[in-house]
Image: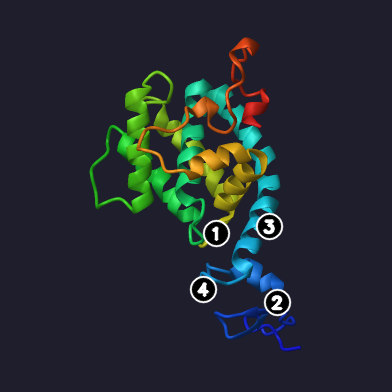
Amino acid sequence: MNACAYCHDRKGKRPCPALGGSICSLCCGEHRITRISCPADCLYLDAGSDYQQKRLSEQFLPLRRDFYRELDESGGQKAVALFNLIEVITFSYFEGRRDGQDAEVITALQALRRTLSPLHIPAAPMPVFAEHLRKEYESFKKQNPAQIADLTDAPAVLDKIDKFVSTFSGKDFQSSRFLGGLIGYVKTHHPEIADHLKRKHEPGHIFLPGQSLLPSPPPSEGHTHGPDCRHHH
C-alpha cells in the first residue's frame, strides 16, 4: 500500500482527490480544509466533520457548563445572556461552513469589545463575521435592553469570553477546535435547536439568550433559568 501523500510516513488508506494519492486517516482528519484544499464532493468531508464535532462536543460540554456558572456568579444573567447570544450567532453563521476558523470568532469578540469601549476610535472596516456579530448584538440590545450586558458591563464579559474561546481553541493559528466543539455540542445535545438555528432568520429575530439552546419549559412548571438548571448544561 502506498505511503500517505501528506506525511509520507504512515500508510495511505483512503483516496485523497486533493493530493492525487492516498492519505492516512490521521492526516485526513487533522489537515482537511485547513491545510489541504479538499474539493466539496470529497466523500470524507461530511463524515469526518461530524465525527470530529461530536468528539469535540464531549470535551466542550463540561468546560462550557463551568464557564456559564462562572459568568453567572461574576456578572449575573446579563453576562450569561451575552455569551448565550454569541453562541447562537456563531452557530448560525458557521454551521455548514467547512472553512470557518476560531480566529474569526476571536477577532469578532475583540472588535465588539473595542466598539463598546468608551475610548473606541473607528478603524478600518471590520471583518465580515465581526461586523455581523456587532449588528446582531446591537439589534438584540435595542429590542431587549434589560436582558443583556451593556456598555457598562459588556467589555469585561467579552474579555472573559475571549479568554474562554482562545483557551479551548488552543495555539494552532488555523484551529477550528472551538467552532467544532460549539457546533458539535448544539447538534449532538440539542438537535431541535440546531434545526431551528439552521433556518434563515432576520437580524435581531433570534432566540432569547436564556432560551436559545433548549426550548422553554411549559408555563405550568414555573421554571426559572439559572446556572444550575439543565438548560445551561
Q: Is residue 171 above or below residue 192?
A: below
Q: x, y (%) of residue 131? A: 32, 46
Q: Looking at numbered disc 3 in the image, what kind of residue is underneath it?
A: Tyr
Q: Is residue 128 left or right of residue 213?
A: left
Nearer to us in this view, 176 or 76: 176
Q: Is label 4 in a helix, a strand or a loop?
A: loop
What's the CA distance linking mark 4 and mark 2? 17 Å
- Label count reads 4
Q: Looking at numbered disc 2 in the image, what kind of residue is underneath it?
A: Cys
- Point out the image quarter for the N terminus: bottom right
Q: Is residue 43 above or below residue 81?
A: below
Residue 151 appearing in the image:
no
Q: Is residue 2 left or right of residue 114?
A: right
Which sits earlier in the primary sequence, circle 3 or circle 2? Answer: 2
Which sits earlier in the primary sequence, circle 3 or circle 4? Answer: 4
Q: Is label 2 in a helix, a strand or a loop?
A: loop
Which sits earlier in the primary sequence, circle 1 or circle 3? Answer: 3
Label 1, on which residue?
A: 175
Label 3, on which residue?
A: 51
Label 2, on which residue?
A: 24
Coloring scheme used: rainbow
What's the CA distance linking mark 3 and mark 4? 19 Å
Q: Looking at numbered disc 1 in the image, what kind of residue is underneath it?
A: Ser
**Alpha-carbon neighbours of circle 4 within 10 Å: few (<14), some, or many (≥20)?**
few
